[in-house]
Image (cartoon, grey):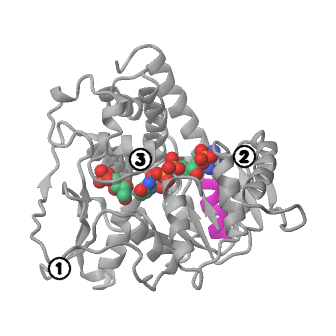
Amino acid sequence: MLLGSTGSIGTQAIDIVRRNPDKFRVVAIGAGGGNVRLLAEQALELGVDAVGVAKATAAQDLQLAFYSEATRRGWATGDFRLPKILAGPDAMTELAQWPCDTVLNGVVGSLGLAPTLAALRAGRTLALANKESLVAGGPLVRAVARPGQIVPVDSEHSALAQGLRGGTAKEVRRLILTASGGAFRGRTREQLVGVTPKEALAHPTWDMGPVVTINSATLVNKGLEVIETHELFGVAYRDIHVMVHPQSVIHSLVEFHDGSTLAQCSPPDMRLPIALALGWPDRVADAAPGVDWTTAHTWELRPLDEEAFPAVALAKAAGEAGRCRPAIYNAANEECVAAFTAGDLPFLGIVETLEQTLTDAPDFAEPGTVDDVLAAESWARAYARERIAGGKGA
Ligand SMILES: NC(=O)C1=CN([C@@H]2O[C@H](COP(=O)(O)OP(=O)(O)OC[C@H]3O[C@@H](n4cnc5c(N)ncnc54)[C@H](OP(=O)(O)O)[C@@H]3O)[C@@H](O)[C@H]2O)C=CC1
Ligand SMILES: CC(=O)[C@@H](O)[C@H](O)COP(=O)(O)O
Ligand SMILES: [Mn+2]
């Protein structure tokens, strides 16, 4: 099951499936509804049983897209069976419970929380790219997930999961997440004034969807990943570190208490962690090219400039405090990224707004239900939007 099949993660997952028909079969796919042509193309190529679109009004366009795709393929009516269409805001959650072994959650944003919980409750293995669901609803996810039921897709967390195979939890001293540094790596705070969405979208090493790319530029992505690390591996925030690694070849490191450190290395290509998550615990041969060991390489690791990029420290504090503050951090960021992309908020205003939103947030309790998360998110979204509309953070 692929949720977010039309996106960067989804299309790369399909590449893995296409090249490994003996290992994987996709039974259903889902996406927002912004690209029904691609969704129909994928559905007919993969021969899925069901297709979901979150935008209810996209259902009719999807139906039409099936027929044009069938015509393009030279298929006559009667030669093929149309997949069942699920449409509306609950479509991803319904699909997450569809009979299958593994659900890959590759949708973007904390709207991925309901499908994450549904897949876990239905007993599926969850290949998780949608880090926002874990950040927003960590305590809810922890309460329903069996040990080992979530397999990380995020490159750093896949690296950590691989490194942790090399020792026991008791032997771990610290986890080190690597960060490319994003589009503005090496800049001072002053040099970030006036940077544009186009510049922020020019990621130095990874080709990804727009939201995660802008989050890389602000380092909010690394903030989300620190919380994701804590939620996935149960390691204390004080033992989770971030290092800037411009080459994006070392995807993260595990240090053990004897002073030994294990790193996972491969050229930046998400098909490797996606394939590993789909096949977990087995590796999929030739998922992506490996490092070329016949040439010279220089791999750097540098401390993060926390003054220019305070987003990681903010996320750590939010994670340590709990009580929906990670959900507030993420929801405010989703609003800020949309505003920055639309030209309504300057780049530095993103993290400034996050900080102010966290400062002014009322005290929420630890979430016990999805509604608790939604209440905190809805407060944060409204607060951030109001600040942005009022020209604050500009
Ligand atoms: N791309 C990457 O390399 C990496 C991504 N991730 C994480 O994976 C997730 C996906 O990222 P990425 O693939 O880059 O994002 P993209 O923007 O490329 O794709 C997003 C996907 O989500 C779908 N979508 C959008 N809105 C909805 C909705 N309301 N309901 C259901 N589906 C929706 C989109 O469908 P539509 O086409 O219809 O809009 C699309 O299929 C994010 O959480 C990201 O942080 C993590 C590590 C690496
Ligand atoms: C590929 C991947 O996992 C992204 O989440 C990646 O981490 C983005 O790169 P940086 O956040 O390190 O710039
Ligand atoms: Mn990552």
Judge whether 38 appears above or below 281 on screen.
Answer: above
Quarter of the rendered image showing ligand 2: bottom left
Q: Is residue 317 visible?
A: yes
| Residues at circles 3 and 1 in contact by the CB criterion of under 8 Å | no
The residue stretch that appears in magenta: 113-121
Q: Quadrant of residue 197?
A: top left
Q: Which mark is residue 93?
A: none
Q: Earlier in the sequence, mark 3 or mark 2?
A: 2
Q: Is residue 368 visible?
A: no
- Residue 338 in the image: x percent, y percent? 48, 31
- Residue 135 in the image: x percent, y percent? 46, 53
Q: Earlier in the sequence, mark 3 or mark 1?
A: 3
| Disc 3/disc 2 C-alpha distance (Å) | 22 Å
Q: Is residue 88 magenta?
A: no
Q: Which mark is residue 212?
A: 3
Q: Earlier in the sequence, mark 1 or mark 2?
A: 2
Q: Nearer the viewer, mark 3 or mark 2?
A: 3
